[in-house]
């Protein structure tokens, strides 16, 4: 199994400058793609990862990481294991700030600014407030499923009949 990004890949993501997304105009967001002749700068709020065949499961999926064996989807990718600050086990960290593994990390629960409920906070939208995991995933899934369908049709055009 792949065990982490290639050298320098993580640094490029962390060191991204902040700016305004050219698609949704959200200010002070990390920029995923710099402005080019093809269009405006795209923030991480609107960026959709490219779809390629996963080197492990061989299905067209969003590229989660590029490893020594090729592009790997999120289901097949394994982060490097580090010692959890709470339980002491060697597991991939879920929270770098707290140095906690997925079993020990508990996301904060707050009133969601996008739905009329409270739940675990997935992201904070500047100027709006917290977005719960449910609202975040439903919005992201709508964008992802269109792109996945297009990739599958391009890969297997006979399945559209």
Image (cartoon, rainbow, N blue to C red):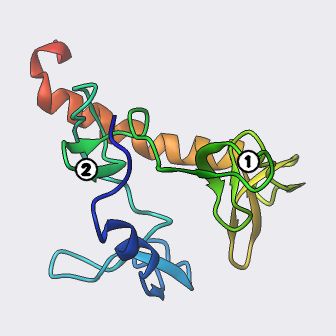
* Residue at left offset 15%, top offset 81%: 37
Residue 50 vertical placement versus 148 (above, below): below
From the viewer's side, name the closer residue of 36 and 95.
95
**Labelled disc at residue 42:** none
Q: What is the x, y in percent for residue 62?
A: 33, 43
From the viewer's side, name the closer residue of 155 and 14.
14
Please state which of the two labelled residues, at mark 2 or mark 1, is closer to the viewer.
1
From the viewer's side, name the closer residue of 84 and 22.
84
* Residue at left offset 70%, top offset 46%: 133
Pointer 2 with pointer 1, Cβ within 8 A: no
* Numbered disc total: 2
Of mark 2 and mark 1, the one earlier in the sequence is 2
Q: Residues within 10 Å of mark 1 (few under 14, many from 20)?
A: few
Image quarter of residue 148? top left
Residue 144 vertical placement versus 47 (above, below): above
What residue sits right under mark 2 in the picture?
67
From the viewer's side, name the closer residue of 56 and 141.
56
Spatial distance from mark 2 to mark 1, Cα to Cα?
Answer: 27 Å
What residue sits right under mark 1 in the picture?
88
Q: Residues within 10 Å of mark 2 (few under 14, many from 20)?
A: some
153 displayed left or right of 96: left
Q: What is the x, y in percent for residue 57?
A: 28, 25
Q: What is the x, y in percent for residue 85?
A: 75, 56
133 displayed left or right of 109: left
* Residue at left offset 38%, top offset 33%: 76
Q: What is the x, y in percent for residue 6?
A: 28, 60
Q: What secondary structure is found at the residue carrying circle 2?
A: strand
Q: Quadrant of the C terminus?
A: top left
42 displayed left or right of 18: left
Image quarter of residue 114? bottom right
Q: What secondary structure is found at the residue carrying circle 1?
A: loop
């Amino acid at each position: 199994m792949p065990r982490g990004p290639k050298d320098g890949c993580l640094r490029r993501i962390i060191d991204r400058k902040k700016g305004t997304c050219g698609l949704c105009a959200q200010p002070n967001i990390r920029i995923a793609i710099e402005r080019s002749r093809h269009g405006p700068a795209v923030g991480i709020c609107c960026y959709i990862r490219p779809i390629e065949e996963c080197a492990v499961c061989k299905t067209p999926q969003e590229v989660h990481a590029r490893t020594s064996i090729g592009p790997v989807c999120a289901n097949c990718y394994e982060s490097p294991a580090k010692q959890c600050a709470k339980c002491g086990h060697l597991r991939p960290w879920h929270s770098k700030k707290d140095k906690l593994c997925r079993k020990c990390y508990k996301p904060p629960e707050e009133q969601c600014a996008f739905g009329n409920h409270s739940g675990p906070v997935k992201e904070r939208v500047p100027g709006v407030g917290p977005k719960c995991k449910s609202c975040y995933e439903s919005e992201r899934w709508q964008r992802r499923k269109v792109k996945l369908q297009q990739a599958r049709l391009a890969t297997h055009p006979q399945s559209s009949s």
